[in-house]
Image (cartoon, rainbow, N blue to C red):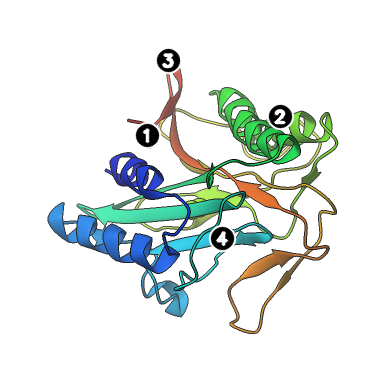
Amino acid sequence: MVAEILQLLHERVQPGVTTFELDQFAEKQCIKWKARPAFKGYGGFPFTICASPNDRVVHGFPDRKQLQDGDILSIDFGLIIDGFYGDSAITVPVGKIDAVTQQLLYVTQDSLTCGIAASVAGGRLSDISNAVQTRIEKEGFSVVRDFVGHGIGRKLHEDPQIPNYGAPGRGAQLQEGMTFAIEPMVNSGLSGVKVLDDGWTAVTVDGQYSAHFEHTIAVTENGPEILTRI
Ligand code: MG
Ligand code: MG
């Protein structure tokens, strides 16, 4: 359900659209599917989606500013159904974007794929972290350290935390049945972020672009299974 609604949001991203419209659309979809938005009211977060364009890293508030050609937009979305949470994020181009930004999106998504591939029973938690970091830094991009992935299930954020950096072979041993949200946040420039006065919106310290991809996955006997993919 998270995947389906994110796909519908993706299809609506184009120049002239506002993130407030996307937020309203997402909320209506939740009502239609009889699911509850996971973020609205979480710690006081006031919206259904996190909308983080350009230098916004994560947790941006939807607003009435029109998206413009050349922007990128990260959409983070989650919901609850039958007591279980799903959480996923995508970063999409608005119109035509430059080559470096295209590469930023590609590498961020691919680093998520690498992290998921390392999510195998018998491995260690930080194998995921290391796989993500290695893929990102090979391209000269920066891993955001202030926010991390997480366990997920009956709560949106469960232990353990899953940083997107670190040496391999450390932390808990991965076991079948564990469910994680893996979510690399990658900056084009410096890794540093700061939080705006709204108390939520994280932006890059140098104003350069940032991308974010996330999937909820399960460790199974047949390897990692992506739960937020259509
Ligand atoms: Mg998320
Ligand atoms: Mg998450």
Q: Which mark is residue 222?
A: 3
Q: Are marks 1 and 3 in contact (CB under 8 Å)?
A: no
Q: Position of residue 14 (x, y in %)?
A: 44, 50
Q: Do the residues labelled 4 and 1 touch (CB within 8 Å)?
A: no
Q: How far apart are marks 4 and 3 (CA)?
A: 35 Å
Q: In this view, does 40 lie to the left or right of 159?
A: left
**Where is 37 relative to 214, above or below?**
below
Q: Which of marks 4 and 1 is nearer the N terminus?
A: 4
Q: Position of residue 49 (x, y in %)?
A: 41, 61
Q: How far apart are marks 1 and 3 (CA)?
A: 14 Å
In the rendered image, which residue does mark 4 sit on? 52
Q: Earlier in the sequence, mark 1 or mark 3?
A: 3
Q: Position of residue 95 (x, y in %)?
A: 53, 44
**Is disc 3 placed on a helix, strand or loop?**
loop
> Observer-nearest residue: 218 or 143?
143
**Is disc 2 placed on a helix, strand or loop?**
helix
Q: Is residue 228 left or right of residue 118?
A: left
Q: Which mark is residue 227?
A: 1
Tag 2: amino acid: Ala
Q: Earlier in the sequence, mark 2 or mark 3?
A: 2
**Is disc 4 placed on a helix, strand or loop?**
strand
Q: Which of marks 4 and 3 is nearer the N terminus?
A: 4
Q: Residue 131 carries which label?
A: 2
- Is residue 169 visible to us here? no
Q: Earlier in the sequence, mark 1 or mark 2?
A: 2
Q: How far apart are marks 2 and 4 (CA)?
A: 25 Å
Within 8 Å: ligand 2 and the Cβ of disc 2? no
**Is disc 1 placed on a helix, strand or loop?**
loop
User: In front of the other: label 1 or label 3?
Assistant: 1
> Observer-nearest residue: 89 or 223?
89
For the residue carrying disc 3, how many other residues have a C-alpha within 10 Å: few (<14), some (14-19), or many (20+)? few
Quarter of the image where one finds residue 127: top right
